[in-house]
Amino acid sequence: MTQDPNPNPRLLEGKTGVILGVANKRSIAWGCARSLADAGMRLAFTYAGERLESAVKKLSEECEGSICLPCDVTKKEEIEDTFAAIGEEFGGLDSLVHAIAYAKREELQGDFFNTSKEGYMIAHEVSAYSLTAVTRAALPLMEDREGSIVTLSYIGAERVVPNYNVMGIAKAALEASVRYLANDVGPRGIRVNAISAGPIRTLSAAGIRDFNSILDQIAEKSPLRRNVTAEEVGDACLFLVGPHSRGITGTTLHVDGGYHMMGV
Ligand code: NAD
Ligand code: IMJ
C-alpha cells in the first residue's frame, strides 16, 4: 500500500511564509508553495521584475489569503520594502523559502576558467549572497517564532557538473552560508537548511544543452530509477518548514532519488 505523504493536511494552519522564486507553474518554488499552502500556511510571493508580476499574481490567487510583492534580491530597498510589507500584512513570519539562482547564460558553457569577474560576482550576488540578505531582513519578523528557512541547491555545489561552472561555485557558497546562518540564528530558535534537488525541467533548465540526456542519465543511475518532481521537492520543503524537522538545522537534504550517494 502506498503511504499518504501528507497525513496531517492542516499542519501549518495559522502559520505564515514567504516564497522567493516563483516564475511559473514549473518553478520549484511553486511546488514548495503548493505543499505549504495545502498544509494551511498563508503565503507571501515575491517576484523579480515587472515582467513576472501578472503571472505570479495569478498563481498566488490559487493560494488562500496570499499576497504578492516585488523583490529583486539585488535591490536592497526592495528587500527592505518587501519585508516591511509582510510585517504589516502578516504581523510576523514563520518561514522563508529561497528558490533563486541566476548566472549570465555565457557563463554556463565552456571552460570554467573563462568565467569573467563580473559573471562571477553576479552569480554569487543573486544565487548565494541573497540568502544572507533576505535572512537578515526576515529575522525581526521571526522573533519569538520557531522560524524555518529553506534554500535550493544542486549537486554541482559538491561535484563537477559539465557547464554548471560558476553556478557550482555559487551553490557551494550557498551551502556554506546555510551552515554559518544556522549557527547564527539557532540560539533564536530559527533553523536554516538546504534542499539539493535533482534536475527538473523548469525555466532555469530551459536552453541547457542536452538537458534531456542529463535527465535520462540521472534517472538511470538513481536508486529510484527516475527523476524527481517539483512536488516531491515541495513535500521535502514542507518537512523542513514544519515541526517534524524541529531538530534539524544547517544541513543539505538531497531530494534526488538517491543519486548523490552513488559511486559510479
Ligand atoms: P525557475 O526559473 O522557475 O526559478 C528561478 C527563479 O529565480 C525565478 O523565479 C527568477 O525570477 C528568480 N530570480 C532570478 N534572479 C532574481 C533576482 N535578482 N531577484 C529575485 N529573483 C530572481 O527555476 P527553478 O529550477 O525552479 O529554480 C529554483 C531554484 O532551484 C534555484 O536556486 C535553482 O538553482 C534550484 N535548483 C534547480 C534545479 C533544476 O534542475 N531545475 C535543480 C536543483 C536546484
Ligand atoms: C544549469 C546550467 C548547466 C547545467 C545544469 C543547470 N544542470 C542543471 C541545471 C545539469 C540541472 C539547472 N540548475 C540546477 C540551476 O541551478 C540553474 C541555474 C541557472 C540557469 C540559467 C539559465 C538561463 C540563464 N541563466 C541561468 N542562471 C542560472 O540565462
Image: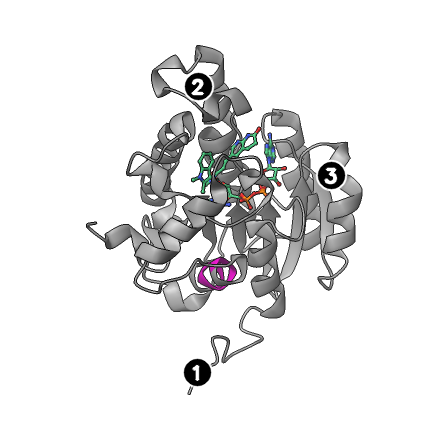
Camera-side residue of 136 and 170? 170
Counting the numbered discs, the total is 3
Q: Is residue 85 left or right of residue 98?
A: right
Sequence-earlier tag: 3 or 2:
3
Q: Is residue 109 above or below residue 200?
A: above
Q: Residue 108, image x and y in percent?
A: 46, 26
Q: At x 48% / y 62%, what residue is drawn? A: 232
Kindly give the residue lying farthest to the left in the view shown. 263
Q: Amino acid at mark 2?
A: Tyr
Q: Amino acid at mark 1?
A: Thr
Can residue 239 be found in the magenta stretch?
A: no
Mark 1 or mark 2, whichever is nearer to me: 1
Q: Is residue 251 left or right of residue 142?
A: left
The residue that label 2 is drawn on is 120
Q: Main secondary structure of the magenta part?
A: helix
Q: Is residue 9 left or right of residue 131?
A: right
SS of the residue under disc 1: loop
Q: Is residue 23 above or below residue 207?
A: below
Q: How is the image coloured?
A: one colour
C-beta proximity under 8 Å, tags 1 and 2: no
Q: Label 3 CB, ligand 1: below 8 Å?
A: yes
Q: At x 47% / y 75%, what residue is drawn? A: 5
Q: Is residue 96 above or below residue 48?
A: below
Mark 3 or mark 1, whichever is nearer to me: 1
Part of the protein shown in magenta: 233-238
**Disc number placed over residue 52 in the picture, else none:** 3
Q: At x 62% / y 33%, what residue is drawn? A: 79
Q: Residues within 10 Å of mark 3 (few under 14, many from 20)?
A: some
Sequence-earlier tag: 1 or 2:
1
The residue that label 1 is drawn on is 2
Q: Residue 144, image x and y in percent?
A: 48, 55
SS of the residue under disc 2: helix
